[in-house]
Image (cartoon, grey):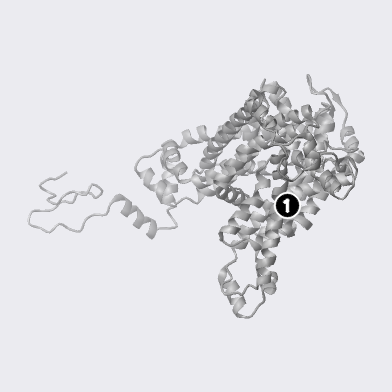
Amino acid sequence: MARSGVQRSGLFVYYRWVLLVGAAGLCLLPLWATVIGGFKSTGDLRTNAFGLPRVWLADNYASIAGSGRFWQMLGNSAFIAAFSVGLTLLVSSMAAFVLAQLRFGGKRWLANYLALGLTFPFATAVLPVFIRVRDMGLLDSYWGVILPQVAFNLGFAVVLLQGFFAELPPELFEAAFVDGCSYPRIFWQITLPLSRPILATVGVLALVGSWNGFLLPLVMINDENLYPWPLGIMQYQGQYGTDWGKVLAFVSLTLAPAVFFYLLAQKHIIAGLTSGAVKG
Amino acid sequence: MASPLDPSPADPARPPVATLPGQEPPQALPTLAEARQVEALTHPRRRPRLWRRLQDFSGSGRLTAIVLFLPPALLLFTLFVTLPVLEAAYYSFFNWNGYGSPSRAVGLENFARVWQDPIFYHSLFNNLLVVLVSALLQVPLALWLALLISDKSRASVVFRAIFFLPYILGEVVAGLIWRYMYDGNYGVVAVVFRWFGREAPEVLATVGWAEAALLLVVIWKYFGFHMALFIAGRQGVPDDVLESAQIDGASRWQTTWHIILPLMRPVVVLSLFFSLLGSLQFFDMIIPLTGGGPSNSTHSAVSYLYTFGIKRMRVGFGSAVGVSLFVICVLVMVLYKRLFMREKPAR
């Protein structure tokens, strides 16, 4: 803390550390138990929840990592997330650009209309969206998940992007305009490159939402081969119910990409998610 | 272009100036941009900003931009967000299984069924519990920890990363992990009980305990998010205020209670707002953890909608739940904004 010169008594430092380490331990304990549990036999799990396995069993992890189904599941999630994030960024930035930079009649009304998306709970729309997706023939397809995800992202995405675009210095556009740049070119060559921070924020929010999404794929997808990992994991758990070793291994493996990605970029992720929240 | 009339090298931005031979070239004429700047400065009211004026007259891509850039967003949004909400309102007046078109109009019967169902009330109560737990347990905890690790030290950064980690894991995963933790036979709870020589109760199968167990998972998962918000807020407290307080002899406790916390009020209000919004949509964690049981005691509004509306394809009924949820959402948000978020700075 930036309280320069405040004398910290040894007791305070001690208490702070004990508290923080304790809290961190409680935080990580379930994750540790899960990862290590994947290596244990069921009997071992019964008596030894926290410690290292008596006998290290690689079967669970190996059989899952070797199964095509696991990778198919992750691949589905990756495909959906990639297109969800990409489309969200593209569509929302285009709309936000027009709303922030151009003047035309009805603009404010349109901006408020899109901002309404922030207030609609997804649960209200899920049944009608299901029917619409079914009638469009997109049930049991990636797009049946991607398109609604993008649509529901538009609320916060457009609001965040519009706010950022409106703060960009107008002199840039004046100069570009005098040079004969058209609006689309300005968008691609000036606005977007300058907007990397906010695009990253929106991207991270959309990515986390899509990767972890459960209700939407649950309703839209019945074909096992298209299951993203939340559905796959529930199916696996349903199948291997009490064989916790297997289930824990499965959970750990599914967590791995997210944790890996998080550790690489956690500063940006935390900053992005919280600043996105504060602004939105 | 050089010409006998303009002996000096031409600045392409500047208009050429005619100079009679033998005479000093007069002061250079202003460039177009300079002229417009002067004009804008001397006649600020009459002429809107250059940028706006150019927009009005120039046709370069303006129409293209509007026609090309707006429709995708509007189309997707209307098709998948606004229309469905309106359709939900429409469907809620029918008894319909989703095939063909809705035919059996039943007026307000669906709403009556929803609002007379004790399970629905209990689900709403669970939503409320989540909010209360967030406000009364999670926020103070997150605040406390945030105040301890808001500095820039390496250790603090590490702790922050650790505490934030549960938030990025999907709710489904959190639900499954804690299902294991609470398992009465193989779970961590079971092992701990065995240390004391007893057999563990099946927590998730006991009414009352299951709800408490669920709330604990909520705290575990989300306190990191609130903590991160509070750290951002804490870092926004200016140092000079704190230093002058210290110079005036304020103790740590006084500084915290009377200066830091009040300055962080906007962030706390915001974090509670997100709690509210999030808790109304609470669903993903329930299915893996309890499936809504035991005896339908751990449903939230959304899991209720899913179990009794979607899974049974009772579109009318489910839509009525959805519409009710929507109304509750709007009411809560409006109320909250009015009560706590009135002091928004004017833009």
Q: Residue furthest bottom?
A: B248
Q: Quadrant of the C terminus of chain B?
A: bottom right
Q: Is residue A133 above or below residue A187?
A: above
Looking at the image, which residue is at 59% across and 45% down?
A159
Viewer-closest of A211 and B11: A211
Q: Name the amino acid type tagged 1.
A: Leu
User: Percent x, y for residue B150?
Assistant: 61, 61
Kindly indicate the quadrant of the structure image that contains residue B180.
top right
User: Percent x, y for residue A144?
Assistant: 66, 26
Res A126 visible: yes
Looking at the image, which residue is at 62% across and 62% down?
B234
Q: Residue furthest left?
A: B22
Res B341 visible: no
Q: Is residue B308 above or below residue B25?
A: above
Kindly indicate the quadrant of the structure image that contains residue B42.
bottom left
User: Percent x, y for residue A182?
Assistant: 41, 38
User: Percent x, y for residue A140?
Assistant: 68, 22
B291 left or right, relative to A61 = right
Q: Residues within 10 Å of mark 1 (few under 14, many from 20)?
A: few
The residue pinned by badge 1 equals: A26
Looking at the image, which residue is at 43% across and 52% down?
B49
Where disc 1 sits, the SS reads helix
